[in-house]
Image (spheres, helix red, strand yellow):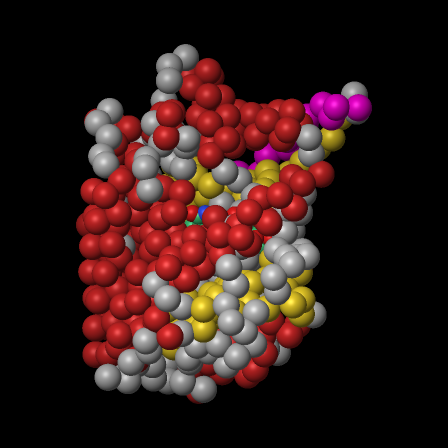
Amino acid sequence: MSHPIAHTPGRIAESPTEHALPSYLQSDNLGPWGIYLQQVDRVIPYLGHLSRWAETLKRPKRALIVDVPIQLDNGTVAHFEGYRVQHNTSRGPGKGGVRFHQDVTLSEVMALSAWMSIKNAAVNVPYGGAKGGIRVDPKKLSLGELERMTRRYTSEIGIIIGPTKDIPAPDVNTNEQIMAWMMDTYSMNEGATATGVVTGKPVDLGGSLGRRDATGRGVFTVGVEAAQHIGLDIASSRVAVQGFGNVGSVAARLFAQAGARIVAVQDHGGTIFREAGLDIPALLAHVAASGSVAGFAQAESLANDQFWDVDCDILIPAALEQQITALNAGRIKARMVIEGANGPTTPAADDILQDRNVLVLPDVIANAGGVTVSYFEWVQDFSSYFWSEDEINARLVRIMKEAFASVWEVARDKKVSLRTATFIVGCTRILHARELRGLYP
Ligand code: NAD
């Protein structure tokens, strides 16, 4: 069966949005939040009577900006800007990661929090959407500085997070250790250990088996499902991966284990290529030792821009937003793009890929494996009863397959892209909850 992509109503050129942006975003010139608003506009025609509530989706419920001052090792004081945005809590507490990156902005965190709302509803975990971040290059901090910054940020956002309010998790440049510090800081302030305040913790501190690999495993699971629909044989496929961190490296490993050749990998340090397929365990060891894929001996290096011309069947963006744009979408050779990253494809690029019959598995379903196992972790923490890794992986795969099948069906029935279909499923659930709860007061 051919994939269900069809022309979506309201195709929009990649130009500054006509939306009346809040004043603090007027200089932002589209950006991730503008992209999200365009994606919402595309789904409104499919929301029926719930479109009455659609404005809810275009406004974050709550956004907190915090100053994060820390003493550096040299005795001076540095200030960093931090954010926590709760986009929607109609279906449950806020849930979403924390990003440490030099390019983090409020607009970006708002968009990431909104995509969390859609994603959590699309896989039907009982959460709203939230996201946080600090505008910092963590690679320039010592371990002690990183810990002090994490703890001060946690204290500052402590007024809005909590196990039943909003539960952070790892994202770009944050990991299990940072979640451990966040859990400890929140717990010290509360006077009681609260493991359920964050997910993605070390297993020895209430973390879940399987969480580390969960997002990449979800990417792989939906990739295999979609490949069957378009008659693509994973075992003989060639895969290119952008981003070799938590998401990209696990996805690469699982595709390689399934027989695929990982022909190209790009990270912040450079781009590498090997027609015969990269040795992923060896590449993981190289990255662990050197911090980047650059300089890997068993591969040739490419100029970063050449990554988009690589001959491959599957392209996995697993780094940052707005990587696939109108400028490079026409060059992509893959038959399928699996969005491990959040927001990697602009709406104009979406249209170009659709016209070229490239199937896009959108972030809001493709990378939902992480939050799904975060949900398992949260449930395990509340019950203080922990499941086996096999049990977790089996439940994860079942949820991902079921969610993907429903989205595929909506895309086929309504003749829309998988992104619009996922937004239809997610937005309908969010707005139905909004309607049932009603407005207070
Ligand atoms: P990570 O910090 O573990 O890895 C990020 C990777 O991106 C690194 O390999 C880094 O070198 C690379 N990168 C950074 N800048 C780049 C650039 N300019 N060009 C190419 N590569 C670059 O982060 P992660 O957790 O793997 O997250 C990656 C993406 O997946 C993000 O969009 C994140 O929001 C999304 N995501 C993560 C999770 C999760 O559970 N960690 C869940 C869902 C979605």
Foreground of the two, 175 or 244: 244
Which residue shows up at 74% across the image and 26% down it? 72
> Can residue 128 be seen from the camera position used here?
no
Q: Quadrant of the N terminus?
A: bottom left
Examine the structure image and report whether residue 333 is included in the region drawn in magenta.
no
Residue drawn where x is 42% and y is 79% of the image: 335
Compared with 2, 60 (above or below) is above
Picture residue at 40% right of the left edge, 37% below the top: 200
Which x, y percent locates residue 368? Answer: 35, 54
Q: Using the rendered view, name the quadrant where residue 187 is placed.
A: top left
Q: Which residue is more in the foreground, 20 or 348?
A: 348
Q: Is residue 60 magenta?
A: yes
The percent coordinates of residue 318 (x first, y second) are: 50, 59
Vertical arrangement, residue 217 with respect to residue 154, above or below: below
| Residue 222, position as x, y percentages in the image | 31, 64
Residue 385 in the figure: left or right of residue 301: left
Where is residue 280? Give x, y as percent. Answer: 49, 56
Say whether residue 65 is left or right of residue 301: left
Is 294 displayed left or right of 420 in the figure? right
Rendered image quadrant of residue 302: bottom right
Q: Nearer the viewer, residue 118 or 437?
A: 118
- Residue 399 appears left or right of 294: left
Q: Is residue 40 above or below residue 159?
A: below
Q: Which residues are magenta?
A: 59-74
Residue at figure coordinates x 40%, y 74% from the top left: 237
